[in-house]
Image: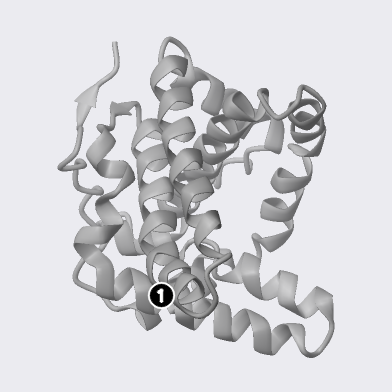
Amino acid sequence: MEKTLPTSAEIRARARASLAGNWTSAVLHFLLYYVVIWALGLLAYIPIIGWIAIILVTGALTYGLFSFYLTMSRNQAPSTGELFSGFEKFVPTFILYIVMCIFIFLWSLLLIVPGIIAAIRYSQAYYILRDNPNIGALEAIQRSKELMEGNKGRYFVLYLSFIGWYILGIISCGIGLLWVAPYFYTALGHFHDDLRGRYMSYSSPPPPPSPYGGQQFN
């Protein structure tokens, strides 16, 4: 008998359990990521060169952010290196970012809703690429589409469940976001692992431990 699908509240509870006792690392690493993004934002004021630089590194940084909190959601201790691990996979992460942007943009031409659905459909691609380093960007996107079949609504509801938290983070002059964002990304990691456990082959090998951490939390 198939297990009942976890609710957004249950996924958030799993995220809090993973973060318990580890908030300091989670928050400080998101602050580091934010500082890097803020510095890159300054490049936007440099015409052409700055824009190109941002496009080149966004895929790698996104991969690293997702990978860091995915490792944390698996109750392992990621290191700072994992936050920037996308640069070791620069080509596939760059291609994945560009292809996703193109696909989402094309769907958005049909109206905003198809664009949102496309973004949700491709939402698992970075996680899949992380756990399957030998596949390409297009295969990661295809696998993401397969995993999200019938689960897009659940993902959207999980997103909506964080709106109140993000509002609280914003009205605290943005300081609260340093706690909300790790909570959010850790919850997304749990959502992915729930999908992976349900819809990928049970004979598949477990995801490899992160080369940047892998130490189990106490």
Q: Residue at x 47, y 17 (%)?
A: 23
Residue 119: horizontal and vertical position, in percent? 63, 69
Residue 93: horizontal and vertical position, in percent? 34, 69
Relative to 163, is 182 on the left or the right? left
Query: In the displayed image of the protein, which residue is found farthest to the front?
Result: 46
Q: Is residue 131 above or below residue 80?
A: below
Where residue 179 sits, quadrant-wise, is top right
Residue 157, visible in the rendered structure: yes
Residue 194: horizontal and vertical position, in percent? 49, 45
Residue 188: horizontal and vertical position, in percent? 54, 44
Relative to 84, is 35 on the left or the right? right
Where residue 91 sits, quadrant-wise, is bottom left
Query: In the displayed image of the protein, which residue is found farthest to the left?
Result: 211
Relative to 66, is 191 on the left or the right? right
Q: Amino acid at mark 1?
A: Leu
Q: Is residue 100 above or below residue 204?
A: below
The residue that mark 1 highlights is 96
Report the front residue among 146 and 113: 113
Q: Quadrant of the C terminus?
A: top left
Residue 200, visible in the rendered structure: no
Number of dots carrying numbers: 1
Report the front residue among 215 and 53: 53
Q: Residue at x 21, y 42 (%)?
A: 210
Q: Residue at x 40, y 55 (%)?
A: 61
